[in-house]
Amino acid sequence: MSGPMLSIVIPVYNAGKYLNECVEGILTQEFNEFELLLIDDGSTDDSPALCDRFAAKDSRVRVIHQENGGVSKARNRGLDEARGEYVVFVDADDRIRPRYLLDLIHSADSLGADRQRTLVLADYQPFSENGTEKRGYPKPFCIDFAAKTGLTADHFRELIFRFRLFPPYCKLYRRDVIEEHGIRFRVGMRSAEDFEFNMRYLAAVDRLEYIDSVQYDYRIGYKKYVPSNRGVLGKSEINSAHIMANGISDLAKRMGILDEVEPEIDLWAANKHYFNRLRMLFTKSRQV
């Protein structure tokens, strides 16, 4: 028996307040050839019962209950269980609009043979209880590393400075690429684990396709997973900063634009709250 075309992985941890809205948005998608994997990561609220209720009413939903291990373990469990040709990640407190999956799949189908070597990116709309947050969107673009096209500083800026390459949502991954290259979220990292995952995936493909689709609403001002470090800069945070610095510079090198954008990277890192630690990693005079 063949599997579904798409596996949707949602890590769930004490998300009962928003889970119903999130899941209902998925079950009513215009594209419906999917399985929905709800990974209950040791929730202590009503999330486990809600997950089971969804599975009982819709055969496309599968629930895995596990002891709390963090968002990376939860997403990795979803990858282990996934049966689809493609994989999509969604956060349990976010909302997705009716064409979210359809836009991603249609874009991949339109690529023909190139779909096997392409990371497809859509975009998102930040929102909170107070409304939506202003966000600009560029025109669709393609970066082809093999053909050496689209390798511009403007495209790099959109991916990095506008945080389009950082999160796992709004992306369509091929599961065969993930499995062939053994790509998983690094457990133990308190931040940047999603960026590191994306950079490993991007290194395994030749193309990146940014599409004209804003069908994902990202909830801001709500902590999905509360970090245990309480803001203390420890080994994990320093390691995350190294990974991000190396990933950003490696992408600029691969695009052949590092000399052009390096001063902007340094300034951007210095002006961002979390990324202050990146500034010293990009300072040439400092040994790290």
Image (cartoon, helix red, strand yellow):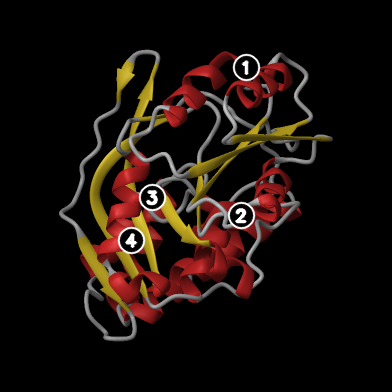
Mark 1, Cα crowd under 10 Å, few <14 / some 14-19 / many 20+, is many
Residue lying farthest to the front in this orientation: 1
* Among the two numbered marks 3 and 1 on one chain, the one whose residue lies closer to the N terminus: 1
Q: Quadrant of residue 60?
A: top right
Front of the two marks 3 and 1: 1
* Among the two numbered marks 1 and 4 on one chain, the one whose residue lies closer to the N terminus: 1
* Among the two numbered marks 3 and 2 on one chain, the one whose residue lies closer to the N terminus: 2
Q: Which residue is mark 2?
A: 83
Give the quadrant of the C terminus: bottom right
Q: How far across and down, in percent of the image, does residue 110 sit? A: 25, 63
3D distance between C-alphas at marks 2 and 1: 26 Å
Q: Looking at numbered disc 2 in the image, what kind of residue is underneath it?
A: Arg
Q: Looking at numbered disc 3 in the image, what kind of residue is underneath it?
A: Phe
Q: How far across and down, in percent of the image, does residue 287 sit? A: 61, 75
Q: How far across and down, in percent of the image, does residue 115 sit? A: 36, 69
Q: Which mark is residue 26?
A: none
Q: Which residue is mark 4?
A: 108
Q: How far across and down, in percent of the image, does residue 98 sit? A: 32, 31
3D distance between C-alphas at marks 2 and 4: 18 Å
Q: Which residue is mark 1?
A: 16
Mark 4, Cα crowd under 10 Å, few <14 / some 14-19 / many 20+, is many
Q: Secondary structure at mark 2?
A: loop
In the image, residue 56 above or below residue 115: above
Question: Is 58 displayed left or right of 261 in the figure?
Answer: right
Q: Which mark is residue 163?
A: 3
3D distance between C-alphas at marks 3 and 2: 29 Å
